[in-house]
Structure formats: C-alpha cells, structure tokens
Amino acid sequence: MHDNTCLSCGACCAAFRVSFDRSELDSEGGRVPAGLVDVENDYTCRLRGTDYARPRCVALVGKIGEQVSCGIYAERPGPCREFAPLAEHGIFPAACNRARSRHGLPALPVAD
C-alpha cells in the first residue's frame, strides 16, 4: 500500500469545476452541505469556489502541494468520490497531472 499522495497534493480541488446533482445536497436527502454550494439550475449545483478563474474548493483545507484535507470528506459529492478512486494505491488518472501542472507540481505515473 502506498502513502496517499492526495493528502499532500490537493491540486484537483483547485483546478476543476465540481458540478453534481442537487439530490446529493443534505437539504434534499443527500450528504453534501447545502451551505457550501452554488446553484447552477433546477437540477445541478457546484461546490463553491470551483468555478472561479482561479478555482479552489471552499472545503479544501491546507496548502496545495504540501498538506491538504477535505473539510467535507465523508460528505463530498459524487464527482469528488469518483475522481481518483485508486490514488491511495498509487494509480492516478491523467487528470491528476493536468491539475498538478496548474500548480507547478511534478507529474505522477498515470494508469493506462
């Protein structure tokens, strides 16, 4: 088992828009805190901060590339859960490197 590189990275949380179905909100029976989102339309919302010119999720805690954590890890929405499901085993999607390059971090080996 590898160390979880995500705990020292956080680049994905400050690189991509995180939109998801409103049914994931705690106010709709889901788990994502409604106070941390912006509504996009009748069906979708996004984590606040992820649609800025320099995105950074409002739930991201810490310094990118050094030590980070998700303030709502247990309640995070589907796109966050699905982004790099094998990262803790040292298997990363190519999107990790796109996010890391935005923050001047070195590339990781990616899964084929």
Image (tube, grey):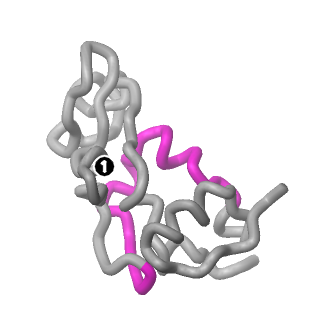
Residue 32 in picture, x, y percent from top left = 31, 40
Q: Which residue lies under the disc numbered 1?
A: 50
Q: Is residue 51 left or right of residue 106?
A: left
Residue 17 in picture, x, y percent from top left = 38, 44
Residue range in magenta is 65-86
Locate the N terminus by quadrant: bottom right
The one nearer the camera, 35 or 95, is: 95
Q: Residue at x 22, y 46 (%)?
A: 48
Task: Name above or below for residue 89 compared with residue 59.
Answer: below
Residue 69 in picture, x, y percent from top left = 38, 70
Q: Residue furthest top?
A: 42
Q: Residue at x 60, y 75 (%)?
A: 4
Q: Is residue 88 left or right of residue 50?
A: right
Q: Is residue 68 magenta?
A: yes
Task: Name above or below for residue 13 compared with residue 80.
Answer: below
Q: Residues within 10 Å of mark 1 (few under 14, many from 20)?
A: many
When asked about the image quadrant of residue 73, the answer is bottom left
Q: Residue at x 33, y 80 (%)?
A: 63
Task: Name above or below for residue 76 compared with residue 96.
Answer: above
Q: Is residue 70 magenta?
A: yes
